[in-house]
Structure formats: structure tokens, C-alpha cells
Amino acid sequence: MRPPPLPHQIVVLERVLRRAGDLAGSPTEPIVVFDLDGTLYDNRARTAQILAEYAGEVAAQFPEVAAALGELAPTSVHYLLSDTLRAAGITKVEIVSDATRYWRDRFFAERYLKYDAVMEGAVEYTRACHDAGAGVVYLAGRDVTDLLPGTVTSLRKWGFPIGEVGVGLVLKPDATLSDEAFKRATMPSLRRMGEVIAFFDNEPANCNVARATYPDAIVGLIETQSVPGAPKPDASIEAIANFRLA
């Protein structure tokens, strides 16, 4: 039986819902902003799937690599692929380079989005925000050219609000643009959509930008994975594990 969410998490999430309800119907629509990867989605299974396929590709030539990667669990996937390979005992430069190329060619491909898992409570909570009267905006580091159709398909598949009044999806215009640079440049323009009352992301840097841009918003840091060397989150940022309310 799963342990219940921490009381602090419930308090934070319920505060957002109450604020959304209080402001619903006001001239300026309340907006709740969600990142996707690492926030609403756990994409470690995407990497695990790609590495399992790589294992099949190199099994004849490198059976020990195939054995190490073929049954790799999503929970063993690190933020950096090099760390994942190292933890699996794969350190040979040629193999690491080849596996990284193989992974990079596939990780940002639409056909692999189907392997992402949904964070606990994510669908129910985004729907609750929308039902409470808030606009829902997905602000993600995925790029619009390669991943827009697949992202919409995934959101619909899992039951997230999408294609409805008060729901927006904002993706990077250029795949080479860093997640932080994109969100730093884009975040101020969210005011055009309404009043940002809450922001959720798994990267401390993005949460810090949200705190500076929207000082009155509730900013939630989802404690999954973040880029190595990430800055310390502002003291006012609320750390939560997922979106479970019960």
C-alpha cells in the first residue's frame, strides 16, 4: 500500500486550487503553468526503451553491453546518459559515444513519447485546476517542429486537458535553444494569457525565474531529476514529490 502524500504537498496543491476558485470569473483569468518532462511526465522509461533497443543492435558484437542495458529499469536512469551508462558498468569511450549518438537520434523523436509515464496525480490535478476555473498552460522544453503533434497526442491519450477553452501549449521554436533560455524569454509573455497564480517545474533554475517574474505566484519544484549543478531554489519555492492529493 502506497504511503500518503506529505501534508505539505497537499497544502501547496490545495492552495492553488483555492486561489483558482477565488479568481475564477474575474476579468483576468487565473493561469496555472506546468512543465512536461520531469514534471507531469517521467521520461526515464523513454531512455530505458531506447537503450534496450540499442542493446539489441549491439548484442552480437558486444554481448556484455547488451546484457547490461537490455533489462535496465527506468528507475536506474540518471539525468545524464553518461551517468546511466557508467552506473551500468559501461565506460568504454567508443561504446559511450555510440550509445549517446543512438539515444540522441531517438529521444526527441515523436514515436518514443509513448513510453513516457505520467507522474502520480498529474492528470487529476491538472484537470482539477481547469475545473476550478484556471487556465492551464503547458510550458515545455520540447520543440514545436518535431514534437508538437506527438505531445498533443500524448496529452489527449492520458486525459490531460488539451484542445479545450482555457488550455494552452507553448513549445520551443528551435530545438537547439536551451530549456532555461527559452523559459526565461517566454515567461513574461504569459501575462497576455492571464494572471499566473502557480508554476510547476522540476528545474530549480526555471522555478527561480518564475519566482522573479511572478512574485505573487505559488511556485512548486517537483523533486524528480534536474540538471547537474542546478542552482539552489529560492527559499520561497515549495518542493513537492508529485501531484497526489490523497
Image: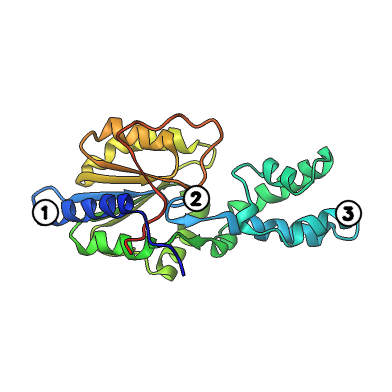
Residue 189 placement: quadrant: top left
Q: CA distance from mark 2 to mark 3?
A: 35 Å
For label 3, the residue is 62
View extreme (left): residue = 26
Image spot of residue 155 (x, y percent): 42, 63
Is 177 left or right of 88, judged from the image as shown? left
Q: Residue at x 32, y 61 (%)?
A: 245
Find out whether the residues at labels 3 and 1 contact each other: C-beta distance under 8 Å. Answer: no
Image spot of residue 136 (x, y percent): 28, 55
Is 28 left or right of 228, judged from the image as shown? left
Q: Which mark is residue 145?
A: 2
Q: Residue at x 46, y 29 (%)?
A: 231
Image spot of residue 32 (x, y percent): 27, 50
The three-letter code of the residue at mark 1 reads Asp
Q: Residues within 10 Å of mark 3 (few under 14, many from 20)?
A: few
Q: Which mark is residue 22?
A: 1
